[in-house]
Amino acid sequence: TVMYHIDTAEQCVTAYDYDLADGTLSAPRVAVRIPKEDGAPDGMTIDSDGNLFIALWGGHRVVCCDPASGERRESYSFPDARVSCCAFGGEDHRTLAVTTAADENGAGGYIYSVLTEHTGAAPYTIQT
């Protein structure tokens, strides 16, 4: 019932109320702000508790944030600056897969995995 959108240029994640019946969005609000010095918010995933995991392009990290308060709860660091996306997987959905992009010198461009204490959200399926 909530949809999140990363606005990289504005350095934030916006939350919207989402109506499942008609697909409309309402009540936009900033859920998380990312300081420019931390990197630019890029890809994102969510865990089963509703925490957002946000890849920070240029920031060497993925941050875990509470969208209700905007509070940063955890941070996972990587050797590559261009952290691009993240997703939960593995048998127990506790492994966070993190992608990075190569820089102009060819550094980076790897996929990392981190075993977390968090469990990824179950996929949404449409009932017909």
Image (cartoon, rainbow, N blue to C red):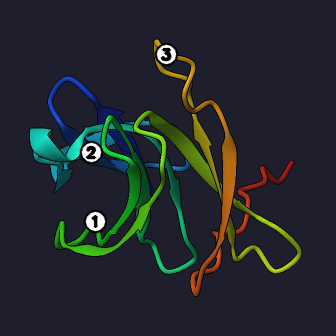
Drawn side of residue 13 relative to residue 44, left or right:
left
Going from the N terminus, do you reach mark 3 or mark 1 first?
Answer: 1
Badge 2 amino acid: Val
Nearer to the camera, 31 or 88: 88
Q: Secondary structure at mark 1?
A: loop
Total of numbered circles in the picture?
Answer: 3
User: In the rendered structure, are the residues bearing label 2 and label 1 in contact, judged by CB atoms less than 8 Å apart?
Assistant: yes
Badge 1 amino acid: Pro
| Alpha carbon separation for disc pair 3 and 2 | 30 Å
Nearer to the camera, 96 or 22: 96
- How would you rate the neighbour count of disc 1 (Cα within 10 Å): few for under 14, some for 14-19, many for 20 or more? some
Instruction: Quickly name the residue at label 2.
Output: 13
Q: Residue at x 41, y 71 (%)?
A: 51
**Residue 17 at x, y = what percent?**
33, 52
Going from the N terminus, do you reach mark 2 or mark 1 first?
Answer: 2
Quarter of the figure with residue 124? bottom right
**Residue 128 at x, y = what percent?**
86, 48
| Alpha carbon separation for disc pair 2 and 1 | 9 Å
Picture disc at residue 105: 3
